[in-house]
Amino acid sequence: MDKFYTFIASAVLGYMLRKIIISIRGGEFIMSLGRGGIRERRYQRIVWSFILLFYIFVFITELKMEESYLAYITSKGLINITLILFLVLELIRGYDPTEIRENGIYFNNSLYKYKKITGYTWSEEDVIRIYYKNIFRQDDFIEIEINDKDLALETEETLQRYVTSKI
């Protein structure tokens, strides 16, 4: 069982390190689009919240069953505390704004590099659809909601500089 907890802790720490590297590799900040795409993030926050509540329940239940709190925290409890902190971090990151950066678009905790973006179009007056090649080199898209008209114009001008084609 300790190998399982070690694996989980390694995966969590690797994931957190990936997030830090993505934010550094994004390049210089150009502009913020606010919390565009908030509809998609709402469902992610609900899932993260349920997982967080589950791990808090597991942590408290296992803590009550142990005779020595210190022995529990040094063995399995440390892993549960790490997972709880990770889930809290993910809930906080769900409120990260969408940003246009020097090397790509930072949306939903991922960096979409300009060289993988194939084009963009406005699907509605306030929703921009950005097409890109995913990890399997298949066409995919993200939708970002921009409610401010001035910000939408500024976004259009910025994307014209960095993205080669408008669909």
Image: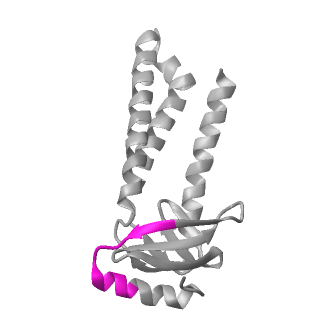
Residue 145 part of the magenta segment: yes
Q: Is residue 59 visible?
A: yes
Residue 10 lies, with reference to residue 20, above or below; the image says: above
Where residue 50 appears, x then y in whole percent?
40, 34
Measuring 47% from the left and 12% from the top, which residue is drawn there?
Answer: 68
Where residue 9 appears, x then y in whole percent?
60, 37
Where residue 107 appears, x then y in whole percent?
48, 65
Where, quadrant-wise, is the N terminus in this rendering? top right
Q: Where does the magenta region start and end?
A: 142-154
Q: How is the image coloured?
A: one colour
Residue 58 lies, with reference to residue 106, above or below; the image says: above
Measuring 39% from the left and 23% from the top, which residue is drawn there?
Answer: 57
Q: Is residue 94 visible?
A: no
Residue 70 lies, with reference to residue 104, above or below; the image says: above
Measuring 55% from the left and 75% from the top, which residue is drawn there?
Answer: 104
In the picture, residue 6 is in which quadrant?
top right
Q: In the figure, is residue 141 to the left or right of 151? A: right
In the picture, residue 132 is in which quadrant?
bottom right
In the picture, residue 75 is in which quadrant?
top right
Where residue 89 appears, x then y in whole percent?
43, 48
Residue 33 part of the magenta segment: no
Observer-nearest residue: 21 or 164?
Answer: 164
Observer-nearest residue: 59 or 113?
Answer: 113
Measuring 45% from the left and 42% from the top, which residue is drawn there?
Answer: 87
Where, quadrant-wise, is the C terminus in this rendering? bottom right
Say how many tags the image has: 0
Residue 63 lies, with reference to residue 137, above or below; the image says: above
Observer-nearest residue: 83 or 126?
Answer: 126
